[in-house]
Amino acid sequence: MKKYIFEIIGVFLALLVLIGDVLYILYGGLWLKGITSALFFLLGIHFLILAFLRKKRIHFPVFMVIGLALTMIADIVLNIHFIAGAILFALGHIFYAISYYRLKRWHWLDLVCSCLLAIPAVLWISLAPMFDFGGVLMEIVVVFYAIIISFMVGKAISNFISNILKHQDYRVALIILIGSILFFFSDCMLLLNKFGAFSKDIREILTILCLGTYYPAQILLATSIRIYVQLDYLV
C-alpha cells in the first residue's frame, strides 16, 4: 500500500478534477472552476514532489508545473478580462513548450509540424466569415495565441515522431501529445463559442466540448511528470 501511495493520491486528485469538470459543465460558477483548476495544478505539484524525491533531472517537471500554474490562473482571469486571460494562457503554452524541449532539443521537424498547424489556424481565424472579433486588437490577440499553441502542439508531435523513428520509449511523448491535442481542440471550441455566429443550442454543445476536453488535457499533462519519473530522459 505504502509503495503505491503517490499513484493512489494521483488517481484521487485526477478523479476530483473530472468530477469538478462535470459539475462546472452542469452548474457553472467561477469558484467551482477555480477549485477544479487548482486541483490539476495540485496534481502537477504532487508529481513534482515525487520527481524531487527520486532525484531525477527536474527541469522538465519544473517547467511543466509552471505551465500548469499559469493555466490555472488564466482560467480565472479569462472570465474577468478575456485578453489578459489569453495572454496568461499563451505564457502557459510557452512554458509547456519549454518543458517539451527539456525532453528533446530543437529539431527541424519541430518547425515543420508547428507550421503545418499554425498556417491553417491563422488562415482559418483570418478568413472564415463565421468569426466576429469586434475589432482588430482582439483578432490580433487570437492570431498570436493560435501561433503560440500551434508551436507547442507541433513540438509535442515532433517529439513523439522522433521517439517512434528512433525506437525510443515514447510513453511520456504520447501522453504529452494526447494532452496537447486535447488542449488545442478545447481552444478551438472556445474560439467558436466566443466569436462564432452560432445559436444558443450550438454554443452549449461547444461549451461541453471545450470543457470536456480541457480538464482531461491538464490531467494528462500533469500525469506526464509521473511517467517521466520512471524513465531516464536526457535532452
Image: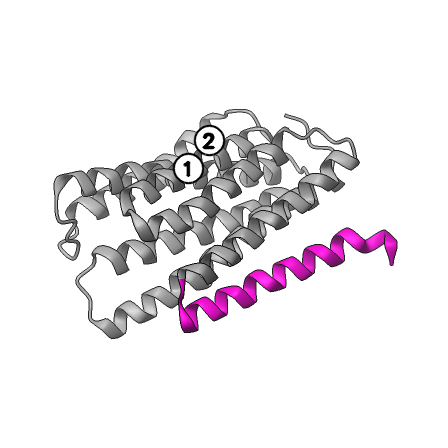
Q: How many marks?
A: 2
Q: Give the residue at x 21% y 55%.
A: 195
| Mark 2 secondary-structure assignment | helix
Judge whether 9 appears above or below 48 on screen: below
Q: Is residue 47 left or right of residue 198?
A: right
**Amino acid under label 2?**
Leu
Judge whether 44 appears above or below 114 on screen: below
Q: Give the residue at x 39% y 42%.
A: 89
Q: Main secondary structure of the magenta part?
A: helix
Dot label at residue 109:
2
Front residue of 34/108: it is 34
Distance of label 2 from label 1 (alpha carbons): 6 Å
| Mark 1 secondary-structure assignment | helix
Front residue of 166/174: it is 174
Dot label at residue 141:
none
| Residue 3 x, y percent position in the rendering | 86, 52
Q: Which residue is mark 1?
A: 113
Q: Give the residue at x 32% y 37%.
A: 147
| Residue 6 x, y percent position in the rendering | 76, 51
Residue segment shown in magenta: 1-29
Residue 55 is covered by the magenta coloring:
no
| Residue 186 x, y percent position in the rendering | 39, 55
Please say if the residues under marks 2 and 1 sit with CB atoms less than 8 Å apart: yes
